[in-house]
Image (cartoon, coloured by chain):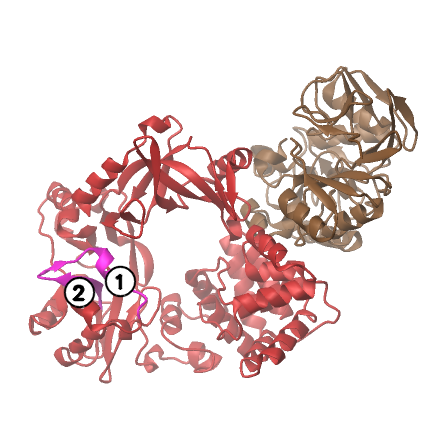
Chain colours: A brown, B red
Amino acid sequence: MTDVLTFTDRGIYCPAGDFYIDPWRPVPRALITHAHSDHARWGMDSYLATPRTAAVMRHRLGDIAVQTIAYDTAQQIGDATVSFHPAGHVPGSAQIRIAVKGQVWVVSGDYKTVDDGLSEPFVPVPCHAFITECTFGLPIFNWTPQDILQGQINRWWAECAAAGKTAILGAYALGKAQRLLRLLDPAIGPILTHGAVENTNEVLRAQGIPLPATTRVDANVTAKTHPGALVLAMPSALGTPWARRFGPASTAFASGWMALRGVRRRRAADRGFIVSDHADWAGLNAAITATGAEKIFVTHGYTTAFQQWLRDQGHDAHVVSTDYQGEGFDAAEDAA
Amino acid sequence: MKAFAALFAQLDESTKTSVKVAALADYFRTAPDSDKLWTTALFTGRRPKRVITASKLRLWAAEVAGLPDWLFEESYSIVGDLAETIALVLPPPRATSDESLTYWIMHLRALGTQDEDARKAGIIAAWDRLPPAERFLFTKLLTGGFRIGVSAKLMTRALAQATGQPEPELTHKLMGNWTPDSVTWTSLIEADDPGTDASRPYPFYLAYGLEDLEALGPPADWSAERKWDGIRGQFILRGGTHYLWSRGEDLMTDRFPELAQLCDALPDGTVIDGEVLAFADGAPLPFAALQKRIGRKTVPRKLLAEAPVILMAYDLLEQDGRDIRHLPFADRRAALAGLVAQVSTHTPLRLSPQVPFGTWDDLAAARSQSRDVGAEGLMLKRHDSPYLSGRKKGDWWKWKVDPLTIDAVMIYAQAGSGRRANLFTDYTFAVRDGDALVPFTKAYSGLTDAEFRQITAWVRKNTLQKFGPVRQVPPVHVFEIAFEGINQSPRHKSGVALRFPRMLRWRQDKPVAEANTLDDLREMLRLYG
């Protein structure tokens, strides 16, 4: 099997097409799986991404040279044929399939296998080699089904509203925040958004993604003007002066790391909702099996353990080090 | 179990004391007596006897979850808590349960008398009937430790709210060696007299570190004595039997058999607060001598000769069967002095001498001699202070000597557990020896959460080698390590062992070349060992 992709200090490289996938240093040509900042970085001469990813990248990175490509559409780049396929991670997120002389490799980017009701649902792509993230590649990570999660969050919000408290929910601005927005029951009260969240909402609404009505928090918005509100904010905004305007509040984080009691307690929030846009243990294993790949490369996450597990299952598995971070669980990483 | 799990969730999720107390008080108003009794027992460190080893539980959980043992262990190292790991990896339960906390405790105790196969079946069946939160608690009961951030103080406050009884009285009632089998809720909490159990100790009075010497007022209002470096203990002689309790409410009577001599020397109905000290030729031995005695239930004769102990008496709490804690310290001390004076000098009982002083400057001078006399500082007590319960400010203060410090280089890091799972918080430190680095201590505490996060990110990016959970890192970061004492130790490569080492500061201003050396450490051993 010839290597369709190689792993360099700039990122994942395809010699046949002379392009990089999600590079972390400037390169002439970059194919981007999704718009999170550890995957879509500034400084590339040209970008190729799905239309929704491109829209967020333009918002985040400004004036960049980006071409778009629809899902499931083949494009020839040099001697390589590439196509993008839904990864289910955030709106517009893609797995990238690269075929060179009959050899098919797939880069997963970040993904999850459950339908979150917002992102284009994950589709397994058969391949010879699969490069997969494993942010949550341990059997301790098993996500709460979305309908139960929805009940938990709305119940918490209703309890807060009844107790005269503002509910402040910390979540990533791109993807997680909008996914949660669509789970919220607007009958409970008004939904307020942190600027970073609302900016992303605007970009996604412009892409035709319907989201419930929200109010951007500005100097005039407080607990008094919006009693019984839920505030969607960046995790890093919790516990800051910005959050104090809401008076008595109950705080919560929405993250896969909330599965761990130690992390929950360290973050010192009132509630932790277990929800991630990455695949859980069962999801990772199901996705890998579905590709039928002979060779598996695992990147960011619990790589060493996950590689060993895959080898135990009879896979030809390898660890690749990358600069991707997946889902961080501490404030410093949340800000990234 | 549902009500207990709901209580646990409230306690665990909140960081606010008022919310925790309210949740507990609510539980104590509504739960059945047997569940209240067990909850009180669990939160004061009384737990059902272990019926199964942790290693068996790991094997069975891995088997039920369909995981290889190594992957279970890997998961455990990330989660940092065995019961939580088990609750997380097991498949969802296939049935439900409405049984009480007491029911499940009785269920696991009943397993104790059965053979291993039956125990295994009983535990797996329980896992399969409990949702994750309750499964975690059930497994926590199986594995022992039940530390969940509820202090005895907080629980007593909640009990006081729920029962309308004063806190100090409840604190006293909860002391001693009761178990949920030896008492009922009514006899423990609702009965009037806490003195029915002869072995029951009084709550210890604990002091805070001194904040402002000048704020204490006239020196003449105060008494000073040495703060001895042994094991704080309460000696009880009632009904012809003696008991020795540690501050952590461990009954240590059998570990220090020489103190049985006090039974003949003291009148019945005597309770003394003091310090168990290894002591010979009129002076305390280094803490290391006492350390050999700790944890030994039976003491070989050789060790008794090498490290004999005495009770250094601080205070008298009960005289002739009367609780005298309300009397002024000066009166209690006088009564204590009277008792000790009648005792033969061969008896292992001493009165902790007062340190005379006329001005605060005199006292500061006395404090600076602490290490020379084998003490870790001074204790200040107001002459008119009653013996309070728990840690209180105002009448008693401890004034410890400044710790010894050394600048050391971090060479290994390991992730913590519990609240610190996933953070590198446990470090090994080295001193320089020529070009080499010699490890000499570990430390876990003293940095802020932000500093731990910063170092964790650095460790992740700069790991040289992994040895299981331990990461070797480049010797770059220098930390100021504080410690209370230093002793010779043939078991350590460096030849020394430190007492209470912790990180005082991250010296980001210091290069490794300016860290202390092995010779510096040896010099400290010579001076203070």
State the image quarter where residue B480 is shown.
top left
Task: State the residue at coordinates (71%, 43%).
Answer: A317
* Badge 2 amino acid: Glu
Question: Which is more toward the observer, B442 or B253?
Answer: B442
Mark on residue B292?
Answer: 1
| B38 vs A223: above or below | below
Residue B279 in the image, given as x and y percentages of width and height = 15, 62
Q: Chain of mark 1?
A: B
Question: In this view, which residue lies farthest toward the front?
Answer: A1
Residue at which label 2 appears: B306
Going from N to C along the chain, the mark reached first, 2 or 1, is: 1
* Badge 1 amino acid: Lys
Residue B439 in the image, given as x and y percentages of width and height = 35, 42
Residue B312 in view: no
Q: Pointer 2: residues within 10 angstroms few (<14), some, or many (20+)? A: some
Question: Which is more toward the observer, B153 or A254?
Answer: A254
Give the distance between the C-alpha atoms of the residues marked 2 and 1, in whole angstroms.
Answer: 10 Å
Q: Is residue B16 left or right of residue A131?
A: left
Q: Secondary structure at mark 1?
A: loop
| B200 vs B328: above or below | below
State the image quarter where residue B196 is shown.
bottom left
Residue A116 in the image, given as x and y percentages of width and height = 81, 45
Mark on residue B230?
Answer: none
| A174 vs B162: above or below | above
Look at the image and give the residue range highlighted in magenta: B273-296
Task: State the residue at coordinates (80%, 43%).
Answer: A294
Q: Secondary structure at mark 2?
A: helix
Do labels 2 and 1 touch, CB within 8 Å?
yes
Whether the magenta-drawn stretch holds residue B320 is answered as: no
